[in-house]
Amino acid sequence: MKEFSSAARDGLTPWQLEEVLRDVGAARYHNLHPFHHRMVSGALTKTQMQAWALNRYCYQSVIPRKDAMILSQAEDPAFRAQWRKRIEDHDGDDGWNGGIARWLKLATGLGLDAEMVKSEQLALPATRFAVGAYLSFCTNRSLLEAVASSLTELFSPVIIGERVPAMLAKYDYVSEDILAYFKPRPTQASRDADFALAYVMQHATTPEKQQAVIDALVFKCDVLWAMLDALDYAYGGKGHVPPGAFNPGEG
Ligand SMILES: O=C(O)c1cc(C(=O)O)c2c(n1)C(=O)C(=O)c1cc(C(=O)O)[nH]c1-2
Protein backbone atom coordinates (compact mmCIF):
# COMPACT_ATOMS: atom_id res chain seq x y z
CA MET A 1 0.00 0.00 0.00
CA LYS A 2 1.38 3.38 -1.01
CA GLU A 3 2.13 5.89 1.71
CA PHE A 4 1.12 9.49 1.05
CA SER A 5 3.09 11.09 3.85
CA SER A 6 6.39 12.23 2.34
CA ALA A 7 5.37 15.89 2.00
CA ALA A 8 5.64 16.50 5.72
CA ARG A 9 9.31 15.54 5.57
CA ASP A 10 10.71 17.16 2.46
CA GLY A 11 8.30 19.49 0.72
CA LEU A 12 7.36 18.95 -2.91
CA THR A 13 7.41 21.03 -6.06
CA PRO A 14 3.90 21.87 -7.31
CA TRP A 15 4.32 19.19 -10.00
CA GLN A 16 5.44 16.57 -7.52
CA LEU A 17 2.42 17.47 -5.43
CA GLU A 18 0.17 16.98 -8.46
CA GLU A 19 1.73 13.57 -9.00
CA VAL A 20 1.07 12.53 -5.40
CA LEU A 21 -2.54 13.73 -5.67
CA ARG A 22 -3.02 11.72 -8.85
CA ASP A 23 -1.50 8.70 -7.09
CA VAL A 24 -4.04 9.09 -4.29
CA GLY A 25 -6.86 8.92 -6.85
CA ALA A 26 -5.27 5.99 -8.65
CA ALA A 27 -5.14 4.07 -5.37
CA ARG A 28 -8.33 5.14 -3.60
CA TYR A 29 -10.99 6.51 -5.98
CA HIS A 30 -14.39 4.77 -5.92
CA ASN A 31 -14.03 3.37 -9.44
CA LEU A 32 -11.99 0.65 -7.66
CA HIS A 33 -14.90 -0.34 -5.43
CA PRO A 34 -16.53 -3.78 -5.98
CA PHE A 35 -20.00 -2.16 -6.06
CA HIS A 36 -18.92 -0.05 -9.05
CA HIS A 37 -17.42 -3.12 -10.70
CA ARG A 38 -20.68 -4.99 -10.29
CA MET A 39 -22.60 -2.02 -11.69
CA VAL A 40 -20.52 -1.87 -14.86
CA SER A 41 -20.52 -5.62 -15.34
CA GLY A 42 -24.33 -5.64 -15.40
CA ALA A 43 -24.65 -7.58 -12.14
CA LEU A 44 -26.72 -5.15 -10.05
CA THR A 45 -30.34 -5.96 -9.31
CA LYS A 46 -32.84 -3.19 -9.96
CA THR A 47 -33.23 -2.71 -6.20
CA GLN A 48 -29.47 -2.21 -5.85
CA MET A 49 -29.51 0.29 -8.73
CA GLN A 50 -32.42 2.16 -7.12
CA ALA A 51 -30.65 2.18 -3.75
CA TRP A 52 -27.53 3.62 -5.39
CA ALA A 53 -29.52 6.44 -7.05
CA LEU A 54 -31.50 7.20 -3.90
CA ASN A 55 -28.40 7.35 -1.69
CA ARG A 56 -26.34 9.29 -4.23
CA TYR A 57 -29.09 11.93 -4.24
CA CYS A 58 -27.93 12.88 -0.72
CA TYR A 59 -24.43 13.52 -2.07
CA GLN A 60 -25.76 15.58 -4.98
CA SER A 61 -27.92 17.68 -2.71
CA VAL A 62 -25.09 18.51 -0.30
CA ILE A 63 -22.66 19.61 -3.04
CA PRO A 64 -24.04 23.13 -3.60
CA ARG A 65 -24.25 23.57 0.18
CA LYS A 66 -20.60 22.66 0.70
CA ASP A 67 -19.70 24.91 -2.25
CA ALA A 68 -21.54 27.75 -0.53
CA MET A 69 -19.39 27.14 2.58
CA ILE A 70 -16.30 27.37 0.37
CA LEU A 71 -17.58 30.62 -1.16
CA SER A 72 -18.12 32.06 2.30
CA GLN A 73 -14.44 31.51 3.10
CA ALA A 74 -13.12 32.97 -0.15
CA GLU A 75 -12.01 36.60 -0.03
CA ASP A 76 -11.01 36.87 -3.70
CA PRO A 77 -13.91 37.94 -5.99
CA ALA A 78 -12.27 36.19 -8.98
CA PHE A 79 -12.18 32.93 -7.03
CA ARG A 80 -15.83 33.35 -6.05
CA ALA A 81 -16.87 34.15 -9.63
CA GLN A 82 -15.33 30.88 -10.77
CA TRP A 83 -16.50 28.73 -7.85
CA ARG A 84 -20.11 29.90 -7.94
CA LYS A 85 -20.54 28.21 -11.33
CA ARG A 86 -20.53 24.93 -9.42
CA ILE A 87 -23.62 25.99 -7.49
CA GLU A 88 -25.32 27.11 -10.69
CA ASP A 89 -24.52 23.75 -12.32
CA HIS A 90 -26.37 21.91 -9.56
CA ASP A 91 -29.19 24.29 -8.71
CA GLY A 92 -29.81 25.78 -12.16
CA ASP A 93 -31.29 29.26 -12.06
CA ASP A 94 -34.51 28.37 -10.29
CA GLY A 95 -33.38 25.51 -8.04
CA TRP A 96 -34.94 22.79 -10.16
CA ASN A 97 -33.44 23.02 -13.63
CA GLY A 98 -29.85 21.97 -12.88
CA GLY A 99 -27.94 18.87 -11.86
CA ILE A 100 -30.01 18.07 -8.78
CA ALA A 101 -33.18 18.00 -10.87
CA ARG A 102 -31.43 15.80 -13.45
CA TRP A 103 -30.38 13.41 -10.69
CA LEU A 104 -33.98 13.24 -9.59
CA LYS A 105 -34.94 12.40 -13.16
CA LEU A 106 -32.53 9.48 -12.99
CA ALA A 107 -34.04 8.30 -9.72
CA THR A 108 -37.63 8.57 -10.96
CA GLY A 109 -36.63 6.96 -14.27
CA LEU A 110 -35.51 3.98 -12.18
CA GLY A 111 -38.99 3.82 -10.67
CA LEU A 112 -38.51 5.78 -7.43
CA ASP A 113 -40.91 8.39 -6.11
CA ALA A 114 -39.50 11.92 -6.42
CA GLU A 115 -40.76 13.13 -3.04
CA MET A 116 -39.39 10.07 -1.29
CA VAL A 117 -35.95 10.62 -2.85
CA LYS A 118 -35.97 14.36 -2.10
CA SER A 119 -36.91 13.76 1.51
CA GLU A 120 -33.67 11.73 1.98
CA GLN A 121 -35.57 9.87 4.73
CA LEU A 122 -34.90 6.41 3.31
CA ALA A 123 -31.16 6.90 2.75
CA LEU A 124 -28.74 4.70 4.67
CA PRO A 125 -27.42 6.08 7.98
CA ALA A 126 -23.85 5.72 6.67
CA THR A 127 -24.71 7.78 3.57
CA ARG A 128 -26.00 10.56 5.78
CA PHE A 129 -22.88 10.40 7.95
CA ALA A 130 -20.56 10.44 4.93
CA VAL A 131 -22.18 13.42 3.21
CA GLY A 132 -22.49 15.19 6.57
CA ALA A 133 -18.76 14.68 7.10
CA TYR A 134 -18.07 16.25 3.71
CA LEU A 135 -20.18 19.29 4.54
CA SER A 136 -18.51 19.66 7.96
CA PHE A 137 -15.07 19.31 6.42
CA CYS A 138 -15.73 22.16 3.98
CA THR A 139 -17.26 24.23 6.79
CA ASN A 140 -14.55 23.76 9.40
CA ARG A 141 -11.27 23.27 7.53
CA SER A 142 -9.19 25.87 5.73
CA LEU A 143 -10.17 27.11 2.28
CA LEU A 144 -7.15 25.27 0.86
CA GLU A 145 -8.21 21.94 2.37
CA ALA A 146 -11.83 22.43 1.28
CA VAL A 147 -10.72 23.16 -2.29
CA ALA A 148 -8.42 20.12 -2.22
CA SER A 149 -11.25 17.90 -1.07
CA SER A 150 -13.05 18.61 -4.36
CA LEU A 151 -10.15 17.12 -6.33
CA THR A 152 -11.83 13.73 -6.63
CA GLU A 153 -13.37 15.47 -9.63
CA LEU A 154 -10.04 14.97 -11.39
CA PHE A 155 -11.05 11.34 -11.64
CA SER A 156 -14.83 11.55 -12.11
CA PRO A 157 -14.72 11.75 -15.94
CA VAL A 158 -13.12 8.28 -15.86
CA ILE A 159 -15.78 6.69 -13.69
CA ILE A 160 -18.58 8.40 -15.63
CA GLY A 161 -17.01 7.12 -18.86
CA GLU A 162 -17.16 3.60 -17.45
CA ARG A 163 -20.59 3.87 -15.86
CA VAL A 164 -22.74 5.46 -18.57
CA PRO A 165 -22.02 3.10 -21.49
CA ALA A 166 -22.28 0.10 -19.16
CA MET A 167 -25.62 1.21 -17.72
CA LEU A 168 -27.02 1.66 -21.24
CA ALA A 169 -25.67 -1.64 -22.50
CA LYS A 170 -26.33 -3.89 -19.52
CA TYR A 171 -29.66 -2.78 -18.04
CA ASP A 172 -32.69 -2.75 -20.34
CA TYR A 173 -34.60 -0.33 -18.10
CA VAL A 174 -31.90 2.39 -18.45
CA SER A 175 -32.29 4.91 -21.30
CA GLU A 176 -30.16 7.85 -22.43
CA ASP A 177 -32.94 10.15 -21.36
CA ILE A 178 -32.70 9.22 -17.68
CA LEU A 179 -28.88 9.51 -17.76
CA ALA A 180 -29.04 13.19 -18.80
CA TYR A 181 -27.33 14.10 -15.51
CA PHE A 182 -24.03 12.74 -16.75
CA LYS A 183 -23.96 14.45 -20.14
CA PRO A 184 -22.46 17.81 -19.08
CA ARG A 185 -20.56 16.42 -16.07
CA PRO A 186 -17.20 15.46 -17.65
CA THR A 187 -16.82 18.97 -19.14
CA GLN A 188 -17.94 20.66 -15.93
CA ALA A 189 -15.74 18.39 -13.81
CA SER A 190 -12.66 19.06 -15.95
CA ARG A 191 -13.24 22.82 -15.77
CA ASP A 192 -13.70 22.65 -11.99
CA ALA A 193 -10.86 20.23 -11.31
CA ASP A 194 -8.38 22.21 -13.44
CA PHE A 195 -9.20 25.34 -11.45
CA ALA A 196 -9.03 23.57 -8.09
CA LEU A 197 -5.77 21.82 -8.94
CA ALA A 198 -4.14 25.08 -10.08
CA TYR A 199 -5.31 26.73 -6.84
CA VAL A 200 -3.89 23.91 -4.72
CA MET A 201 -0.59 23.86 -6.60
CA GLN A 202 -0.23 27.61 -6.13
CA HIS A 203 -1.26 27.80 -2.48
CA ALA A 204 0.12 24.61 -0.89
CA THR A 205 3.48 26.27 -0.38
CA THR A 206 4.77 24.54 2.75
CA PRO A 207 5.26 20.85 3.55
CA GLU A 208 2.50 21.14 6.16
CA LYS A 209 0.03 22.61 3.67
CA GLN A 210 1.00 20.01 1.09
CA GLN A 211 0.34 17.22 3.58
CA ALA A 212 -2.98 18.85 4.48
CA VAL A 213 -4.16 18.86 0.84
CA ILE A 214 -3.07 15.25 0.35
CA ASP A 215 -4.98 14.31 3.52
CA ALA A 216 -8.02 16.25 2.26
CA LEU A 217 -8.10 14.23 -0.95
CA VAL A 218 -7.66 10.97 0.98
CA PHE A 219 -10.56 12.02 3.23
CA LYS A 220 -12.78 12.73 0.21
CA CYS A 221 -11.94 9.40 -1.42
CA ASP A 222 -12.97 7.84 1.89
CA VAL A 223 -16.33 9.65 1.77
CA LEU A 224 -17.10 8.20 -1.66
CA TRP A 225 -15.75 4.76 -0.70
CA ALA A 226 -17.78 4.65 2.52
CA MET A 227 -20.96 5.40 0.56
CA LEU A 228 -20.41 2.38 -1.69
CA ASP A 229 -19.38 0.19 1.27
CA ALA A 230 -22.67 1.07 2.96
CA LEU A 231 -24.68 0.20 -0.16
CA ASP A 232 -22.77 -3.03 -0.60
CA TYR A 233 -23.36 -4.09 3.00
CA ALA A 234 -27.03 -3.17 3.12
CA TYR A 235 -28.11 -4.39 -0.32
CA GLY A 236 -25.35 -6.77 -1.38
CA GLY A 237 -26.92 -9.84 0.19
CA LYS A 238 -24.30 -10.21 2.93
CA GLY A 239 -25.63 -7.74 5.45
CA HIS A 240 -29.03 -6.30 6.08
CA VAL A 241 -31.00 -3.14 5.37
CA PRO A 242 -30.91 -0.85 8.43
CA PRO A 243 -34.29 -0.12 10.06
CA GLY A 244 -36.10 2.70 8.31
CA ALA A 245 -33.98 2.60 5.14
CA PHE A 246 -35.20 1.94 1.58
CA ASN A 247 -36.34 -1.69 1.45
CA PRO A 248 -38.67 -2.56 -1.42
CA GLY A 249 -38.81 -6.20 -0.27
CA GLU A 250 -40.53 -5.16 2.96
CA GLY A 251 -44.22 -5.98 2.94
O1 LIG B 1 -20.30 10.24 -10.65
C1 LIG B 1 -19.39 10.25 -9.85
O2 LIG B 1 -18.80 9.24 -9.48
C2 LIG B 1 -19.05 11.57 -9.28
C3 LIG B 1 -17.96 11.72 -8.44
C4 LIG B 1 -17.70 12.99 -7.91
C5 LIG B 1 -16.51 13.07 -7.08
O3 LIG B 1 -15.51 12.44 -7.45
O4 LIG B 1 -16.52 13.71 -6.05
C6 LIG B 1 -18.56 14.07 -8.19
C7 LIG B 1 -19.62 13.80 -9.09
N1 LIG B 1 -19.84 12.60 -9.62
C8 LIG B 1 -20.52 14.82 -9.48
O5 LIG B 1 -21.43 14.57 -10.28
C9 LIG B 1 -20.38 16.11 -8.94
O6 LIG B 1 -21.16 17.00 -9.28
C10 LIG B 1 -19.34 16.36 -8.03
C11 LIG B 1 -19.01 17.50 -7.32
C12 LIG B 1 -17.97 17.14 -6.52
C13 LIG B 1 -17.27 17.92 -5.51
O7 LIG B 1 -16.63 17.32 -4.65
O8 LIG B 1 -17.37 19.17 -5.54
N2 LIG B 1 -17.66 15.85 -6.74
C14 LIG B 1 -18.47 15.36 -7.66
Image (spheres, grey):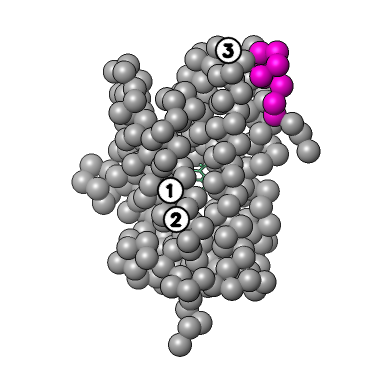
Numbered disc 1: secondary structure: helix
The stretch drawn in magenta includes residue 112: no
Q: Residue at x 70, y 29 (%)?
A: 4
Q: Residue 132 — which label?
A: 1
Question: Is the C-beta of the residue carrying label 2 under 8 Å from the nearest atom of ligand 1?
Answer: no
As measured in the structure, the alpha-carbon distance from the residue carrying label 2 to the one carrying label 3 is: 34 Å
Left or right of 87? Residue 207 is right
Outermost residue, left side: 94
Badge 3 element: loop
- Pick the front one: 208 or 210: 208
| Comes first in the chain, label 2 or label 3 | 2
For disc 2, the neighbor class at 10 Å (few under 14, some 14 to 19, many from 20) is some
Q: Which residue is mark 3?
A: 206
Which residue is painted at 49% across and 34% down in the image?
150
The single residue placed furthest to the right in the displayed view is 1
* Quarter of the rendering occupied by the N terminus: top right
Q: Amino acid at mark 2?
A: Arg
x and y percentages locating residue 207 in the rendered image = 62, 15
Asked whether the beta carbons under mark 2 and mark 1 sit within 8 Å of each other, the answer is: yes
Q: Which residues are magenta?
A: 4-12
Residue labelled with disc 2: 128
The amino acid beneath tag 3 is Thr
